[in-house]
Amino acid sequence: MDDDRLHKLINKLIVATDPVEVVSLYSEWAERYESDLDDFGYVAPQLASEALIPLLHDTNALIYDAGCGTGIVGKLLGEQGYHNIVGADFSDEMRKHAEQIDAYTRLEYADYSKAVDIKDATYDAIISVGVYTARFEGTFIREMLRILKPGCPFLFSCRPHYYEGDVEPQLAQLRHDGKIASIEIEDKPYMLKQQANAYYITLHKPQAKL
């Protein structure tokens, strides 16, 4: 693994706001994505999956993997018996790799900088790992809550530089607006070799009113 190459690529993705650039960067990375991240000690998919599983006792639950990439999270959940997973990603190349692991009932294109074409209250759970970026401010969290069924969990990872000044005030406003029933935030490892942590944020949508 070329550490300098990977550092540069990740740093480009962190600051990228142009969707064309983002697609190009992920297309370039798709072939080496999993091996690169393994070498960097990327533990976020494992930790996020382990956090979601206790919240989902029914392995038939309809799960949305937002920003599924090459399918790491889908594979981990599939190994635990979950078999009703929909994956979505911005990159065609990433989705092609995800198709090969047979973890998803279907794979879709999604751009989380805008509204997604999904009906309200569709999913029993949503998980999103290593996906949140500045491009999604004001849309992503609200859209995920919209397509989530009442009372169900939405778990996503968020790097500290996105949380402070961006995600934190969004969550406060959503809580104030009654869109979130509970929030749990854990600071846990993200990439071991970088000694980087992330926030793992679990939101529960309020139960439906009778």
Image (cartoon, rainbow, N blue to C red):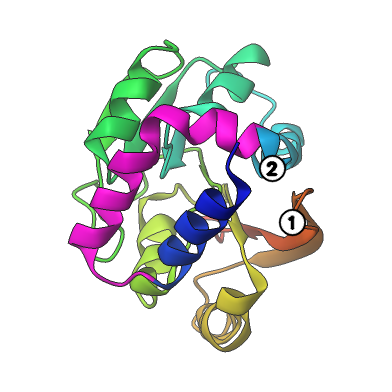
Depth check, front residue: 105 or 158 = 158
Q: What residue is disc 1 on?
A: 194
Count neighbours of disc 2 (C-alpha within 10 A) and say few if under 14, some if 14 to 19, many if 20 or more. Answer: some
Q: Would residue 81 be seen by someone viewing this image from the given angle?
A: no
Of the two numbered discs 2 and 1 on the same chain, state the one appearing first in sequence.
2
SS at mark 2? loop
Q: Which mark is residue 40?
A: 2
Please determine whether, in this image, residue 122 is positioned above or below residue 98: below
Tell me which amino acid carries mark 1. Gln
In the rendered image of this protein, does residue 176 appear above or below residue 39?
below
Q: Are marks 2 and 1 in contact (CB under 8 Å)?
A: yes
Residue 15 is tagged as: none
Q: Is residue 204 magenta?
A: no
The region drawn magenta spans: 16-38
Query: Residue 124: percent from the left, percent from the top?
Result: 50, 38
- 192 lies left or right of 118: right
Question: Looking at the rendering, which quadrant does residue 30 occupy?
Answer: top left
- Marks 2 and 1 sit apart, C-alpha to C-alpha, by 7 Å
Q: As displayed, is residue 73 above or below residue 200?
A: above
Give the percent coordinates (x, y) of residue 171.
57, 77
Q: Amino acid at mark 2?
A: Phe
Q: Residue at x 51, y 81 (%)?
A: 170
